[in-house]
Amino acid sequence: MRRLASKDLVIATHNAGKLAEFRELLAPYGINVIPAGDLGLVEPEETESTFAGNARIKAHFAARESGLPALSDDSGICVEALGGAPGVHTADWAETPDGRDFPMAMKKVWDLLEAQNAPEPRRASFICTLCLAWPDGHDEIFEGRVDGRLVWPMRGDRGFGFDPIFLPDGESQTFGEMDPARKKEISHRSDAFRKLIRGSLA
């Protein structure tokens, strides 16, 4: 597994929330985080059918265009009774002409489960795949996940995306209700970051 020698790292996202999370997680390692937007990089089209595939598209594009190592993530929720959907299309399910509407997307998921009379518990997993890519084309992939079940009605106004209907295994609160510090301990993104740190930073 290749170690990250450079202290400069391009973060291949234009999402302000993700950028803040990346900064916080990488700060203890002395990494100089460079947002892709600061370099004038566009967001490449995500055309793959897997989280790893789309993470690779973003990281390799940023590494190639910047000449620096780049880190990206691709993440989403996979619902067992829906054959793993929405999966890589998680954000797409929330798209509207006026921006993303996640309450609408959560209701869509629940209505589909109701329509097929899906048995309880309605199992789901949050997946996060990180790709660390170098300008020479090498990359390392780190996948994190957290398993749980879906609940209805929506619970809590913390977090984002599908958090208000996701109840992690062993927990009494959804991600939407949970204290952010607790969510950070068990989330799919934190799981992936721990693997990245062990593999390429520590």
Image (cartoon, rainbow, N blue to C red):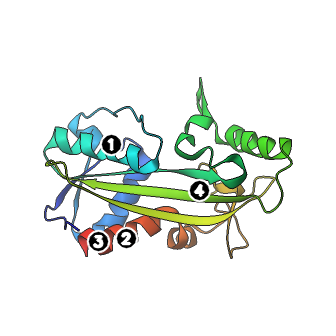
Question: According to the image, label 3 marks what residue?
Answer: 199
Q: CA distance from mark 2 to mark 4?
A: 23 Å
Q: Position of residue 160 (x, y in %)?
A: 58, 51
Query: For this rendering, which residue is in front, 74 or 2?
Result: 2
Which mark is nearer the camera, 2 or 4?
2
Question: According to the image, label 2 marks what residue?
Answer: 195
Q: Quadrant of the C terminus?
A: bottom left
Residue at 54% from the left image edge and 50% from the top image edge: 76
Q: CA distance from mark 4 to mark 3?
A: 28 Å
Q: CA distance from mark 2 to mark 3?
A: 6 Å
Which structural element holds mark 3?
helix
- Residue 93 image-quadrant placement: top right
Between disc 1 and disc 2, whose residue precedes? 1
Q: In the rendered image, is residue 157 in sight?
A: no
Question: According to the image, label 1 marks what residue?
Answer: 58
- Residue 142 image-quadrant placement: bottom left
Is mark 2 in CB contact (under 8 Å) with mark 3? yes
Which mark is nearer the camera, 4 or 1?
1
Residue at 47% from the left image edge and 57% from the top image edge: 128
Which structural element holds mark 2?
helix
In this picture, is 49 found above or below 127? above
Q: CA distance from mark 4 to mark 1?
A: 24 Å
Q: Position of residue 82 (x, y in %)?
A: 70, 47
